[in-house]
Amino acid sequence: MKKNVGVAVLGLGWMGQAHSRSMLRIPSLFPERSVDPRLVVCADTEESRRARAVEDFGFERSVENWEEAVSADDVDAVWVTAPNMLHIPMIEAATAAGKAVFSEKPIGGKPEQAVRAYQVAQAAGVATGVGYNYLWAPLVIHAKSLIDSGQLGDITHYRGHFLSMYGSDELGLLTWRFFMDQAGYGVTSDILSHSVSMAQFLVGPIAEVTGMKNNTITHRPIAQGAAGHYGRGAPDDPKGEVENEDFASMLCTFANGATGTFESSRTMVGPESQNSFAVYGTKGALEWNLETMNELRFYRLTDDPSSGYTTIYGGDRFPYHGAFVPGQANAIGFEDLVAIEDHVFLESLAGGERFSPGFREAVDVVSVQQALIDSWTSRGWEPVVDLAP
């Protein structure tokens, strides 16, 4: 008999909708599951979203006050999908109520907030998960198996970047993502964190870093009312200052001696959602890019004069892929990765097993972020100090 897990979702924006849709799909995607999610309550300040939660997503009820949702007796697990700076009070309340917590990254917007989340979850003894969903791409999991099996030899260099156009329009509205008191840091929290988590997953801990930041769009039209993140203003609208960084780059040394280079930008024109990595070893190399997420490029060192990169296409021979589509080279998409991570998190709750990435791995990511932030001031190399208490 399958176990039911009562779910609360805090915030029905983009990621709140993605997780809600994913949990609705889990029964049809994973017939051999041991747990069924039950969408109990959604909390959102917008009346229209609360109505959608019930009418379109099938939540049993919706509330304006998120405190009411996290303390409800029929809730077992809480998904935190609200703006960054609301993460910590929500996590504190949920853990105090004994609920398992899945939070979208970066958990708060500053390193110390991710550390705080880890502390309260550890003290409460509750299960945790973090939305580094790209780690669940079937070909990323396959890349990890190739590296771990030694097919690349000793890893010598890692190149990671997340270049996106979501903030490239200078008339894009000045919404919460651009304020330190609402989002925290900019691209280092928002998208570089994905690159760092990927590197740590594939290659291992990062030992030291140095880097830089920049703002290419310093002012944006001030948002009015409940304007969406992707809204656009007019040239003559009043403008306000962007408070966090829109570009960051980083050099690093991994604990195993490999070197690394990273770039992240939300204003670069051209790369639309280029979350990518390249891993280089003494026997081979791998390349993957979210924009072509169903393809993995693999180079094997050989004496064959016709050697070169081979493209591996996604398919049901790789983990989880077959839950969505059978055969080879039939593509899956972004929200399928969310469904995979939600399924695995729920299964971990049912089995009493630790889920990874959890809040501990989030601290590993922000430990690197803090060293990078320190290097902006010192303009030198900074050691990565484990911020976990």
Image (cartoon, rainbow, N blue to C red):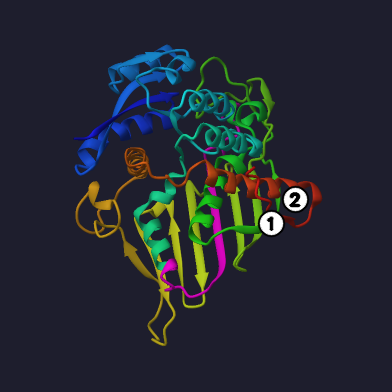
Q: What residue appears at the point 50 percent right and 58 percent down from the top-left corner?
A: 277
Q: Which mark is residue 209?
A: 1
Q: Say whether residue 187 is left or right of residue 40.
A: right
Q: Nearer the viewer, residue 67 or 270?
A: 67
Q: What residue appears at the point 50 percent right and 49 percent down from the top-left corner?
A: 271
Q: Nearer the viewer, residue 48 or 91?
A: 91
Percent across and percent down for residue 245 are: 67, 40
Magenta residues?
147-174
Percent across and percent down for residue 279 are: 50, 65
Which numbered disc flags the more N-terminal residue, 2 or 1? 1
Q: Are marks 2 and 1 in contact (CB under 8 Å)?
A: yes
Residue 160 magenta-highlighted: yes
Q: Quadrant of the C terminus?
A: top right
> In the figure, 33 relative to 160: above or below?
above
Percent across and percent down for residue 362 are: 55, 43
The three-letter code of the residue at mark 2 reads Ser
Q: Say whether residue 62 is left or right of residue 92.
A: left
The span from disc 2 to disc 1 (Cα, nearest Å) is 8 Å
Mark 1 residue element: strand
Residue 161 magenta-highlighted: yes
Q: Is residue 204 visible?
A: yes
Q: What residue appears at the point 62 percent right and 21 percent down from the top-left corner?
A: 222
Q: Say whether residue 185 is left or right of residue 342.
A: right
Mark 2 residue element: helix
Percent across and percent down for residue 241 are: 70, 28
**Residue at the disc numbered 2:** 375
Q: Which mark is residue 112?
A: none
Residues packed near mark 1 inside 10 Å, few (<14), some (14 to 19) or many (20 plus): many
> In the figure, 124 relative to 304: above or below?
above
